[in-house]
Image (cartoon, rainbow, N blue to C red):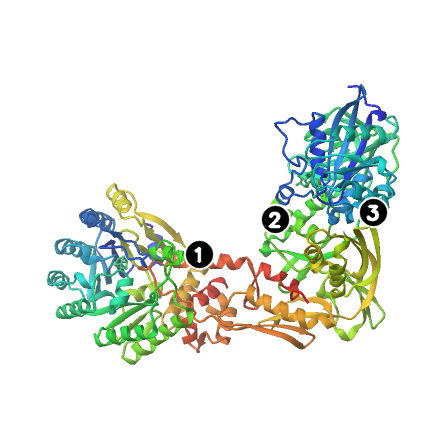
Amino acid sequence: MNPGRSKCWPEPRAAYVHVPFCAHHCGYCNFTVVAGRIDLADALLSAIERELRDLEHSRPVDTLYIGGGTPTQLSTGQLDRLLTTVRHWYELSAGGELTVEANPADVDDAHVEVLARHGVTRVSLGAQSFQRRKLGVLERDHTAETIYEAIRRVRGIGAAVSLDLIFAVPNESLWEWEDDLQQAISAGPEHVSTYALTYERGMAFWGRLVRGDLAEIDEETQAGMYETAIDRLGAAGLSQYEISNFARSGCHSRHNETYWMGDAYFAVGPGAARYVDGVRSVNHRSTTTYIRRVLQGQSPVAESECLAADERARELLVLGLRRRAGVSLDDFFARTGMRVDALCGESIAELVRHGFVDRSEATIRLTRRGLLVADSVWSQLLRG
Amino acid sequence: MARIDCKHIRNFSIIAHIDHGKSTLADRLLQATGTISERELREQFLDDMQLERDRGITIKARAVTIRHEHKGEMYELNLIDTPGHVDFHYEVSRSLACCEGALLLVDAFQGVEAQTVANAYAAMEHELDVVPALNKIDLHHARPEQVLEEMESSLAVDPSEVLRCSAKSGIGVDDVLAAIVERISPPEGDPDAPLQAMVFDAVYDDYRGVISYVRLMNGTVHKGDRIRFLRVGREYEVVELGQFTPQRQAREQLVAGQVGYLICNIKALDDVHIGDTATAAHGEQAEPLPGYEEPKPMVYCGLYPADGENFEELREALTKLHLNDSSFEFAPETSDALGFGFRCGFLGLLHMEIIQQRLEREEDLDLVQTAPNVTYEIQTKTGETIQVFNPQQVPDAGKIEEIRQPIVRANFILPADYIGPVMQLCTEKRATYVRTEYLSPIRAILTYDLALAEVIYDLYDRLKSVTRGYGTMEYELRGYFPADLVRLDVLVGGKKVDALSVICEREDADRRGRAIVKKLRGEIDRHMFEIPIQAAIGSRVIARETISAMRKNVTAKCYGGDITRKRKLLAKQREGKKRMKSVGSVDIPQKAFLAVLETGGER
Ligand SMILES: Nc1nc2c(ncn2[C@@H]2O[C@H](COP(=O)(O)OP(=O)(O)OP(=O)(O)O)[C@@H](O)[C@H]2O)c(=O)[nH]1
Ligand code: SF4
Ligand SMILES: [Mg+2]
């Protein structure tokens, strides 16, 4: 490690662990997953242990996130082994946040017991929907009952609940979505993440879309669904704090905030992305390749990039604007040594003029309109 | 090697209307004389530019030397296959200036067409020996007798002198070869006089520099000789010379009457010009030859690099291409919307398209082209007369006394059955009737005067459609005449986009304006905000369309902190935008700049 560099780059205070296993590869999913290969679990755990050893000594972190795939696909023994190792290398500070993603159907008493033993503070449930029809289209194996049951169990160990919800599923109507929102609200989670179903290359749904077997929900309806989510969840006390994240006050995901703030984070596991010493790097996405490389003592990193100062500053701006709180101008200057205006003052003025960005003395933030076309806002800001 | 005597040389061009079989006949001549083997042969062998093969037409005149035995004596025949399309007429006249004869082909079914007449006249004006031939006599629907009658009445040829052949089947090819030797005069020229070589074409080769194509009028040139190009006056050593067989074949010398090439290691593109004369650098020097009259461009358009950084590359590419085709013009210009680029003049729309495609293919450039326009003459209130090559240069209406536009005299040659529809088309185009002549009872020439601007929009396509492909036309500039014209501006997102302005007839402005904004609405993608698209004359808006704002464009998913992946997706989108031009904050795709050609369909 280069001591000169570690001086200017603060040590990460967050860590991500990727567990790629899933019972089935859902057609709309583009995460790094392997379906039906739970037989690789022990090898994966060994590889993760091996990768973690490179840290040399245990690192203090404030947040730890075990994501996937489906971490709860692991047997209780394997999950226990994983959490033990991970917590050894990433030492959670007092009051730290430990999140585990879970598939509602996997949340049985035995798994919950393991989570409790390791002090898990949040469980992020891949609920997606409460509607039988939507869950069918999404190729998920649970029902609304399963979700309620999982929530009850998570509550039993005193952990906070986050629900993932998907909208704009083929043929979804606005009222179907409203019903999902209603059910989610009555289930009383601390946190909700919601995404519109997106079609990307590499997904089974993409092929079906191209063949005309599936149809995308029209933009107007999608916009309406998104706005309804913001309004309904907000009215229920789950206020939007990031483009796709909603929480009761004090319950936002501190781990995810690390990403939006442009702070550093560690990561291990196949396809895991980290940001350490100013370098963003991603591990190989194939689980078998990842395992092979690590166990042979090779680096699992597939690609890495070190951004130039102004690119990093733009990225920081774009990520920061995802947060509803927006970007503090002084804070931005303190972190980048650049003034937002010097970087892209003209674009911002333009965006303000069109009502996509709100600007006050101290901060800039997206307006409701800006939120709806955030990707276009990013392209504008990334270009100048 | 013994030096060849002029009496054993024949220099001729093959001329005809487009598609009447020039290149195919050249194939037969190459084959019959054993210049190329059966194995090498492919259809239209001399059309070796990729664009020519793609389009199935000849674009560049192409010279080739063939050897042919006639009555026990060996002859060297230098043939030049010329293009038939009207836009490349300049290639024909340059070729004719290097020849003593012309083989005039007429399609035995199609008959005499516009370029048959234009090219035949050009050959006569050069005082060449014309050998007329009916081609495609193998066609079962050929109508040789009527076509002979058309030739007699339009070209004054004696039917008994017309050969009959089929370039496809090979019928009559031997007669064609015999006639070339017997009916075309040998070149006159003195091999011992000072060197006088006419540069009739040139290409730039990255390794060898400029390759000049020459016809020796007098004198002899050897490898290693020092020569001088008279226009610039610079002296060079001939490092290689030779003939086209059809590939370049090095020789020791070229003598008066012969056609070939010179390579002198010339890297400065400006040192050689088409029409230039090469002579000996030392000793007695020859007079410069008259050269060629540069044709006047008929249509202009702006060519801009899609990526503004490639301006210098574009200049370089235009300079190189200009060496090979001096009939287009280019001069730097700037546009608010498009940045730095060039205003280029062409002989016609096909010429414009070909140059643009050659730039893109041969020089690997990505270009934005603005809609073509003609040249206007403007008389200002202060009494000045200015030439305008670009709608942006038109001054405010208040300063204009009169605008004059180019008027052409067009000859339409068509089967008599189509006279009605073509007359109707001409009325639509506000053309003035001049006369009707009959070539034969079933074929006529209609003559009209009309605005060149109408010709460049869609007249040619319309003519083809109303005559089912049988009508042809050629035109000639008559001069500039006053007209009631206005400048139509286009505003995108409230900002005037200079590169989208057009000049049109006042009475036509509403219709054009509506058609243009409608077309643009379809070309420009939706943005974050609503985009009004307006057409205006001065400050008066005459048409408007709106592109509604994008409602939702946000992909919320972020893959476990994989920010790089997210950024790459955005970067990819941006890459696409690079191929667009931004005006204000609106991204306009390259091809939208041609939207102003939209005429609003049939009237
Ligand atoms: N049946 C028949 N077809 C012919 C004959 N000669 C040429 N063609 C066809 O006519 C078409 C045009 O032939 P080209 O040789 O390319 O004509 P061109 O005069 O060189 O055309 P441009 O160079 O574009 O002016 C081709 O499809 C030829 O195959 C012929 O004698 N008989
Ligand atoms: S959506 Fe969730 S469960 Fe389905 S394949 Fe993706 S990670 Fe696995
Ligand atoms: Mg040809």
Q: Which mark is residue B360?
A: 2
Q: Quadrant of the C terminus of chain B?
A: bottom right
Question: Do callouts 3 and 1 point to residues on the same chain?
Answer: no
**Residue B427 showing in the rendered view:** yes
Image position of A317 with respect to A72: above or below: below
Q: Which mark is residue A308?
A: 1
Mark 2 or 1: the one toward you: 2
Parent chain of label 1:
A
Asked whether B350 or B163 is in front, the reply is: B163
* Residue at image location 73% in from the left, 56% down from the top: B299
Q: Amino acid at mark 2?
A: Glu
Q: Which mark is residue B345?
A: none
Q: CA distance from mark 3 to mark 1?
A: 57 Å
Q: Which mark is residue B293?
A: 3
Question: Do callouts 2 and 1 point to residues on the same chain?
Answer: no
* Residue at image location 85% in from the left, 31% down from the top: B183
Parent chain of label 2:
B
User: Where residue A146 sits in the image (x, y, percent)?
Assistant: 18, 66
Parent chain of label 3:
B
Tag 2 secondary structure: helix
